[in-house]
Amino acid sequence: MMLRLLLGSGGYRTPERVALLTREMRSFFGDIHQLLFVPYALGDHDAYLNMVKERGLDAGYQIIGIHHTANPRQAVENAEAIFIGGGNSFRLLDSLYQFDLIEVIRQRVQAGMPYLGISAGTNVACPTIMTTNDMPIVMPPSLQALNLVPFQINPHYFNLPVYLKDGDNYLPHFGETRDERIGEFHETNDVPVVGLWEAGMIRIEGASARLIGTGARLFRKGCEPIDLQPGADLSDLWQCSGV
Amino acid sequence: MMLRLLLGSGGYRTPERVALLTREMRSFFGDIHQLLFVPYALGDHDAYLNMVKERGLDAGYQIIGIHHTANPRQAVENAEAIFIGGGNSFRLLDSLYQFDLIEVIRQRVQAGMPYLGISAGTNVACPTIMTTNDMPIVMPPSLQALNLVPFQINPHYFNLPVYLKDGDNYLPHFGETRDERIGEFHETNDVPVVGLWEAGMIRIEGASARLIGTGARLFRKGCEPIDLQPGADLSDLWQCSGV
């Protein structure tokens, strides 16, 4: 079966961005009925499920919260498609381990079940969550994640200077830049990292991987980063060792 | 002996901020000769040591890199004072475990050795590094840290909207706000968190704890956050359970 993933950066907070995401979801999921929604990245699962429906992020599909199912593993085994939402990646991964869902999700996706991840849901699709932006509020048993793609994604990526808006003034903010953080990742890890701008997505179908909606910056250990344009073909990331 | 810590937020990137920090360092360390500098939060230890000297962040004290000592534990045991620099908190804590420095630093500081932490060096002074902003590029054996103070600090704190400067335009950036992240921390943890604005410091001497240079926001589980002004007395944080 063909691997099928739609991995979103997050930041779907404007009507244009919601329209971009849901249009892509319709095209990606096609003629299915129900999405199994995994809200574990946030603390209040019901509130998250309601928010997804209210904002129209269900794209018109029936959506069922995994926290409402009697047996989460069984729910994954029976799902037509899975949608893992955003929030805190450490908490999400911890819950996936706690409910023993890592292997069953991996097996179903590798057998062709479509996977939609947003932000934290995109982080956990990668080999590890080591390129998350989130705060380590809980410690999962491991940072190893679903390992569905051979590269890391850094969601909510940007490489512009950060300013804080204080009334009418913009104040500079220091602290490490995102590029510095990803550079630090490559001081101790070899896996390529795709910095995915907000609202962007990577759509993977078998051997095809394409950047949708925004640009991205590709970081490989020991190389200068490369800026990619919307529509760019990312399938090379499956062809090489990544170093 | 009296507990003595100077915990800096980071962002000492302007002449005014460097002057604020080094003036406070002179007042805090007083009449000692040498600082033992711990550069483990960055990958290139020599470059970091040189940068500290070049920017004048040694405040005129002799500074010796712990990575140049034959026996890091012995170096801590013999140090007049310790200065733990910023970078990646996960890498820093991992190195402190790797070199078996957690207990010896804790014992020396509890016995009165002055401790200066900047950014990551401030994170590791807390009970855990669960309120770091850093990327988990390596996994330390535990997120438990030096536990020198009974509260968490979030360095580089801000609660203003984030914009990215693109030419002459400022673009909004979404993703969790810092207050949302700290709120998530309190969904699974009880320890109070001090959000410390860049350039700010907390100076602790025995029962006295004072905010220096900037404001801060105090987060307690289940309470509204409280904004504190420069000079605020933080010693209440030792008086209560924190919930």
Image (cartoon, coloured by chain):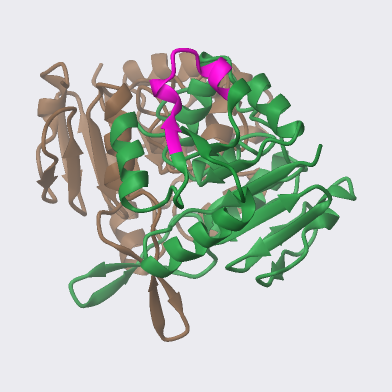
Chain colours: A brown, B green
Vertical position of residue A123 compared to residue A50: above or below: above
Q: Magenta stretch?
A: B63-76
Outermost residue toward the bottom in this view: A168
Q: Quadrant of residue A110?
A: top left
Q: Is residue B185 above or below residue A55?
A: above
Residue A30 in sight from this viewpoint: no
Above or below, B129 relative to A149: below
B79 to the left or right of B113: left
List x then y, in percent, for residue A26.
Answer: 31, 47
Quadrant for residue B146, please give it: top right
Q: Residue at x 62, y 51 (%)?
A: B30
State yes or no: residue A160 in magenta.
no
Query: In the picture provided, is B19 more to the left or to the right than B233?
Result: left
Residue B79 vs residue A236, the one in the foreground: B79
Quadrant of the image containing the N terminus of chain B: top right
Whether residue A206 is visible here, answered yes or no, is yes
Who's the residue at 37% across and 45% down the image?
B52
Residue at image position (10%, 27%) is A236
Task: Report x, y in % for residue A82.
Answer: 44, 32
